[in-house]
Amino acid sequence: MRKLFLFLTVIYHTLLLGQTVVTTYPLDIKNPKESDQILNFENAVTHEVVTFIASQENFTILKYNSALFLTDQFTGPVEFKNRSLMGYSFSEDGNPTLYWYSEISKDIIIVKYYFESKASKALKFQFEVSSELIVTSFQKDNTFNLLTQHKSAPALILYVFKNGIVEEKILDFTPFKFQDRKTQPRSLNQILRDYPIEKMEPGQYNPLSKVVSKTKLYLLSNRLILTFDHSLKKTQLFDINLNNLEIKEQNFLQPDHKKVSRSSNSYYHENKLFQINVNSDELLLDVKQLDSQTVMKSIAVSKNDTIRFKNSPLLIQRDNFKPTELKNTAKFLQQLSSSDLGVSVFKNKKNLFITLGGQQLIDQGFDGFQPIVMSKSIFFETIWTKALEFTTEEQQPLALDKIYLFMDSHTEVALENIMKFKDYFILGYFDTKTKQYTMRKFTDGYD
């Protein structure tokens, strides 16, 4: 299922896609398969870019400087089949390391690739499969990070890989108490079983399909923010210091309705917490300062009001079909109150782009043994200044909008990979028509 981005991704079919071909490289991939993979990644220190291309038989590594000119390359046979590329890191010598994960054996082959000698060196990492579950992985400051959940103890385990060394950090939640939706005591593992962690992508627009999650993980420079929103009454937030492993808990009460609320959620952005609470009569949105819990902005919209701060229509979209406009706030709230609620906040150089909405997954029966599920999204967009003031600016497409439009209209795109680079995005892919690896640059706004 295609992720839902801003409504521009589906209604601006006539949009001139602002994109530039940055570089191409000939590739001999006859018939791309699901097992083939392309990964682009940036050295956070030198801003060099490395592209790793793995086909059925061979791999190719391309090294680009910060201006995206090709400076080095080498190829070799694929040695680790039936494994997926999980992530990367860079050593202090500037050479990349890739992490190959096996779903079958539940281990990771760590391979460092040396441009100087055109050789590689492999190690194996085996985490405790019997007692740990993989939650997510991410890159930070040229390190590869693997986050797991202990199956019985109230703890998360963070493995940090760099320079051939792995550091284990235990995030202990023993001092903290958890409750379910009905305020009954539950363990951390019981909560995470019902509401798995969804990682938010830093510096990117996170779509409704992700932000409706009740448990979200945010990556900061030396901290992790973990939020729980399964309770209708509050957001339970944990601020995790990765230097000393100190965990601080804060509880933020949701804005209160006169009538029982049907759905609530939150979104963390730059030391602020955006909390949304909805029933069929009213939408409430609070913005609170993280440290003091001071309410910086509070919005209440009733079903009889016109939402004057919206910068898009009130929209409903089924699967990837063209969205239709809802006639009034009452119809919007009626649909939204029966949905999984979410709010997403994205900042560009000038403004905050905020999506308020929800998503429903509706069973449509079976196609043979495969269940058919239809998604329905209800949402609108609003654009604020960084001082949290409303604007009347016209909604403009983001780079990610353009990328998804481009991929939807170009069948030759295969093995695609999207990378944030400087202040724009790079779409890297194998072009099945020209038989080339191609990088295209996409920027925010109209061109």
Image: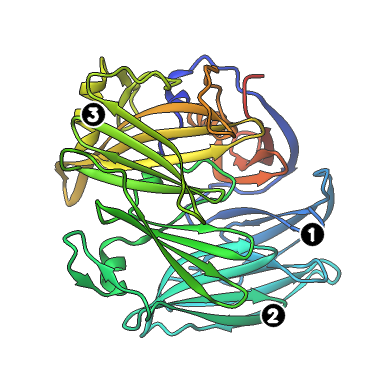
Q: Position of residue 317 (x, y in %)?
A: 31, 27
Q: Residue at x 39, y 40 (%)?
A: 286
Residue type at mark 2: give it: Gly
Residue type at mark 1: give it: Val
Q: Is the residue under label 1 in contact with that under label 2 (CB below 8 Å)?
A: no
Label placed on residue 244: none
Q: Position of residue 93 (x, y in %)?
A: 83, 71
Considering depth in this image, is 54 or 129 the residue closer to the camera? 129
Label 3 or label 1, whichever lies nearer to me, is: 3
Q: Residues within 10 Å of mark 1 (few under 14, many from 20)?
A: few
Considering depth in this image, is 355 or 137 the residue closer to the camera? 355
The residue singled out by tag 1 in the image is: 45
> For residue 124, what is the image quadrant?
bottom right
> For residue 18, what is the image quadrant?
top right
Of callouts 2 and 3, the N-terminal one: 2
Label placed on residue 164: 2
Question: SS for tag 2?
Answer: loop
Q: Residues within 10 Å of mark 2 (few under 14, many from 20)?
A: some
The residue singled out by tag 3 in the image is: 333
Q: Position of residue 177 (x, y in %)?
A: 30, 73
